[in-house]
Every structure is written in C-alpha cells, then in structure tokens.
Image: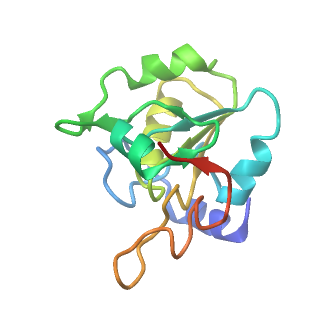
Amino acid sequence: MTQNSADANQNHHTPTVLPSAPHSPLHPELKQLLPQEAFAMLQSKGVVFIDIRSEMEFFFVGNPKGAINIPWQDAPDFELNPNFIKEVAHVAKTDQPLILICRSGHRSIDAGNALIAAGFHDVYHVVEGFEGDRDEQHHRSTVNGWRFRGLPWVQC
C-alpha cells in the first residue's frame, strides 16, 4: 500500500455502510489500492475484479478491461442494489481477493464495507476509481484514476 493509502486508512476508523456518500468511513479491514497497484494485483490468478458502477457508466463511459459489472446502485432510481452481496457471491468466494472500482473511489468504500460485513475477508477498493477526481473545470480522467493512469480499458 502506498503512503497516500496508509494516510487514508489512518483517517477512517468507524465501519459504516452509507448509500454512496462521498468520504464514507472506511472499514478497518477494507484495503486500498492505487490503480497501478490494482492492475499489478490483477495479474495474479484468483483475483476477482468488480466494477460497481451502474450499467450505463460501465458500458457508455467505459470500464477496466476484465472487470465484472455488479452495480452497487443502478438506474432508474439509483437505489442500493438489494442483491449486491448475492451477485458478488456468485462470482467470488468469501476468502478470494476482491478488487472493487467505481467512478472516483467513494461508492467502492460503501460496497467494500458491505462485503466485509457480509463475511468477505480480502476486499480492496481502488482509491482513485475509474474516472478519478474532477479538475478545476469539473472534468474527470484528467487528474487521476484508472483511465488517467493509462491502464487497459474498453468502451462500447
């Protein structure tokens, strides 16, 4: 884990599941990775990569190559997916390494917290997300994130 990741871990201690609130508290067992670290980890067998963004984001904005889309929230109302844990359990075992990614690294905290509470033991989230933070003009993919880092991605 990088120094930035370690700093983020020190600032969040209370495990709480919030509906995609930015800066949700980080469960102490939820591990953080920068996009490059996630990509390196994905080169190992047995790691499951889940993009938790909505189907629209996944297909139309693009997605990391090889990621499985299991929305944490989805259209039309963007309510929490009541089947999220069950859907993840269909593609991963509770002791398998899971890497979660969302747009900017906030929803993946909530989803990771929920998976840990449901008994998953090796859960990571990508701190910068797929598109990263917004710049001064409110554009994404210009400051940080999976795409900004030049990591493999696809778009329909």
The residue furthest right is: 44
Asked if residue 56 lies left or right of residue 147, the reply is left
Asked if residue 134 lies left or right of residue 147, the reply is left
Q: Quadrant of residue 48?
A: top right
Front-lying residue, 110 or 49: 49
Task: Judge whether residue 79 can be spotted in this image.
Answer: yes
Task: Judge whether residue 15 can be spotted in this image.
Answer: no
Q: Quadrant of residue 9?
A: bottom right
In the depicted structure, whether residue 41 falls above or below residue 136: above
In the depicted structure, whether residue 80 falls above or below residue 8: above
Could you say where residue 116 lies in the image, as x and y percent from the top left?
53, 32
In the depicted structure, whether residue 12 falls above or below residue 14: below
Asked if residue 36 lies left or right of residue 78, the reply is right
Could you say where residue 50 lies in the image, as x and y percent from the top left?
55, 35
Q: Quadrant of the N terminus?
A: bottom right
Residue at (69, 25) in percent of width and height: 96
Residue at (59, 67) in percent of width and height: 148
The residue furthest front is: 156
Q: How is the image coloured?
A: rainbow
Q: Quadrant of residue 46?
A: top right
Front-lying residue, 8 or 71: 71
Could you say where residue 106 lies in the image, as x and y percent from the top left?
42, 55
Residue at (51, 75) in percent of width and height: 142
